[in-house]
Image (cartoon, rainbow, N blue to C red):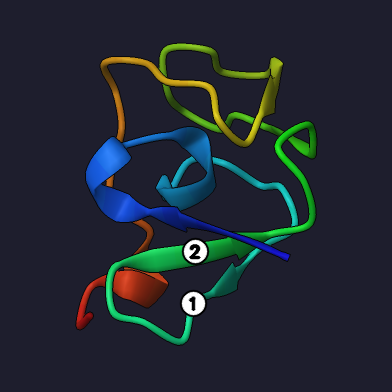
C-alpha cells in the first residue's frame, strides 16, 4: 500500500471521496492500494464524478477518520 500525506489535500484524504482507503499508521497519512485507485466524489466540486486518489480540487475537506490525527 502507498501512504499519502494529508498535507497534500488530495482526494484520498478528503471526506467527500468514496474510494477504498485506510488511515495510515503515521498521523496525517492515508493508505491507498495504488495511485490510480478511484472513487466517487460526493458533494464536492466534482460531485458524482469518478476521481483518482491523487486528484485535487478546491472543495477538499479533511477525512473525518483523520480528524484526531
Q: Count all numbered tags in the image, as a single digit.
A: 2
* Residue 69 percent location from the top left of the image: 22, 80
**Crowdedness of circle 1 by 10 Å Cα count: few (<14), some, many (20+)?**
some
Q: Quadrant of residue 51?
A: top right
Q: What number is the disc on residue 32?
A: none
**What crowding class fits label 2: few (fewer than 14 Cα within 10 Å), some (14-19), or many (20 or more)?**
many
| In front of the other: 48 or 10 | 10
41 is higher (above) or lower (below) than 64: above
Circle 2 — which element? Answer: strand
Percent of width and height locating residue 32: 68, 57
In this rendering, is residue 63 above or below 49?
Answer: below
Rendered image: mark on residue 30 = 2
Image spot of residue 19 (x, y percent)? 71, 48
Farthest front residue in view: 2
Which of 37/39 is in front? 37
The quarter holding residue 61 reads top left
In the displayed structure, 34 sits above or below 42; it is below
Question: What distance separates the C-alpha of mark 2 from that of mark 1?
Answer: 5 Å
- Mark 2–mark 1 contact, CB under 8 Å? yes
Residue 24: image tag: 1
Q: With 53 as the anchor, is 55 left or right in this view?
A: left
Which residue is drawn at the image coordinates 36% and 54% (left, top)?
Answer: 5
Task: Please indicate whether residue 1 sits to the left or right of residue 61 in the image.
Answer: right
Helix or strand or loop: what does disc 1 sit on? loop
Q: Position of residue 12 (x, y in %)?
A: 53, 46
Quadrant location, the N terminus? bottom right
In the displayed structure image, the side of residue 64 where residue 58 appears, left or right: left
Q: Which residue lies at the image location 66% right of the left edge and 47% below the top edge?
A: 18
Residue at 42% of width from left, 12% of height from top? 45
Which numbered disc flags the more N-terminal residue, 2 or 1?
Answer: 1
The answer to whether 63 appears left or right of 19 in the picture is left
Amino acid at each position: 500500500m502507498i501512504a499519502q500525506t494529508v498535507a497534500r489535500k488530495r482526494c484520498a484524504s478528503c471526506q467527500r471521496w468514496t474510494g477504498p482507503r485506510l488511515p495510515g499508521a503515521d498521523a496525517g497519512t492515508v493508505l491507498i492500494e495504488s495511485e490510480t485507485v478511484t472513487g466517487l466524489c460526493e458533494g464536492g466540486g466534482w460531485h458524482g464524478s469518478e476521481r483518482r486518489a491523487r486528484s485535487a480540487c478546491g472543495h477538499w475537506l479533511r477525512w473525518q477518520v483523520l480528524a484526531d490525527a
